Image: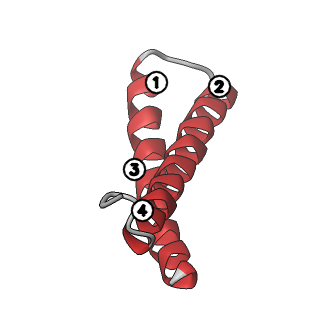
């Protein structure tokens, strides 16, 4: 079960990270940030989105697999 959740979390996390990167890049480019700052800000948002979705997937999997809701 944990392997499946890691796979799903990684997949959706990667999609979320890519989306966050592209959105952040597009928005910050409008404000004429330097190339280095564009990369730094976009990558930090991508990593945050990836980690968030991976963590949420693992927490939801834990909750549903251990019946924490019904206790």
| Discs 3/1, front | 3
- Ranked by sequence position, the earlier of labels 4 and 3 is 3
Q: Which label lies toward us, 3 or 2?
A: 3
First along the sequence among labels 3 and 1 = 3
Q: Earlier in the sequence, mark 3 or mark 2?
A: 3
Residue 43 lies, in percent from the top left, at 61, 41
Q: What is the spatial separation of the Cα atoms under label 3 and label 2, in whole angstroms?
A: 18 Å
| Quarter assignment of residue 36 | top right
Q: Are marks 4 and 3 in contact (CB under 8 Å)?
A: no
Q: Quadrant of residue 27?
A: top left
| Structural distance between the alpha carbons of marks 4 and 3 | 27 Å
* Outermost residue toward the front in this view: 71
**Residue at 48% over, 57% down:** 59
* Residue 28: numbered disc: 1
Marker disc for residue 19: 3
Q: Nearer the viewer, mark 4 or mark 1?
A: 4
Residue 37 disc label: 2
Q: Nearer the viewer, residue 35 or 44?
A: 44
Does the CB distance between marks 4 and 2 fall below 8 Å?
no
Residue identifier under label 4: 63
Question: Image point 50% across, 47% down: which residue?
Answer: 52
Q: Spatial distance from mark 3 to mark 1, Cα to Cα?
A: 14 Å
Would you place residue 34 above or below residue 45 in this image?
above
Q: Residues within 10 Å of mark 1 (few under 14, many from 20)?
A: some
């Amino acid at each position: 079960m944990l392997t499946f959740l890691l796979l799903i979390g990684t997949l959706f996390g990667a999609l979320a990270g890519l989306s966050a990167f592209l959105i952040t890049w597009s928005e910050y480019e409008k404000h004429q940030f330097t190339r280095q700052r564009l990369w730094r800000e976009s990558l930090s948002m991508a990593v945050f989105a990836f980690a968030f979705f991976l963590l949420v997937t693992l927490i939801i999997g834990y909750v549903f697999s251990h019946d924490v809701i019904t206790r």
